[in-house]
Amino acid sequence: MAPAPLRLLVVGGGVIGSVYATWLQTSGHQVTILARGQRLIALQEHGLRIEDAQTGQVLTTPIATVDHLAPDADYDMLIVAVRLEQVAALLPSIAATRRIPTVLFFLNNAFGVEQFVQAVGPERTVLGFPGIGGHQLGTTTKYWD
């Protein structure tokens, strides 16, 4: 018997957030992505579209979106996939989402994790390294892994 799909919120519609949100959604999980501005509009109109730069394989999937992190947000996991300099501004909102038991900080950070653990709590904080890079080409995210 397969485990139930996870309800995931990915914060960040850039390369890392888009690629992992697509992979997780096409694997059967229920993914919502938090984005703003033109990226939010593009995701609502076109969904997620990623292209593997090595193989040329393209995956496209519709995606649920939100434009803010509500304190009563209810997901199994929150995946933070924004630039390091954007995290500090998000920490108060993330800390307020007490219904989300696990917060995965998915970024390159050589400066330590103390600020994440202090804001979110050691019992909720998980660290990850995405291991991909890429860039946006219109509504397509081209990536290398």
Image (cartoon, rainbow, N blue to C red):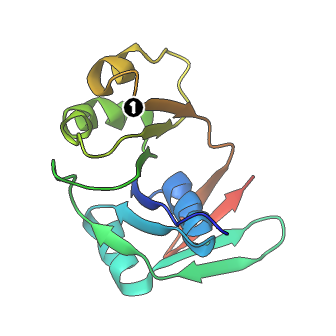
Residue type at mark 1: give it: Arg
State whether residue 82 is above or below residue 44. above
Q: Is residue 102 above or below residue 123?
A: below
Position of the N terminus, as image quadrant, is bottom right
- SS at mark 1? loop
Vertically, is 68 above or below 5?
A: above
Residue 76 point in image, percent of width and height = 40, 52
**What residue does disc 1 label?**
124
User: For the view shown, which residue lies furthest in the right direction?
Assistant: 55
* Residue positioned 20% across, 56% down in the render: 68
Residue reaching furthest to the bottom:
45
- Residue at the (47%, 56%) spot, across then down: 14
Q: Using the image as rendered, state which of residue 63 and residue 57 is in the foreground.
A: 63
Residue 63 on image: x %, y %: 42, 76
Res 45 → quadrant: bottom left
Q: Position of residue 125 (x, y in %)?
A: 43, 29
As rendered, which of 135 and 24 lies closer to the eye? Answer: 24
Residue drawn at point x = 39 percent, y = 31 percent: 124
CA neighbours of label 1 inside 10 A, class few (<14), some (14 to 19), many (20+): some
Residue 92 x/y as whole percent: 19, 32
Q: How many marks?
A: 1
Image quadrant assignment for residue 130: top right
Q: Dividing the picture into quarters, in which one does residue 102 lie? A: top left
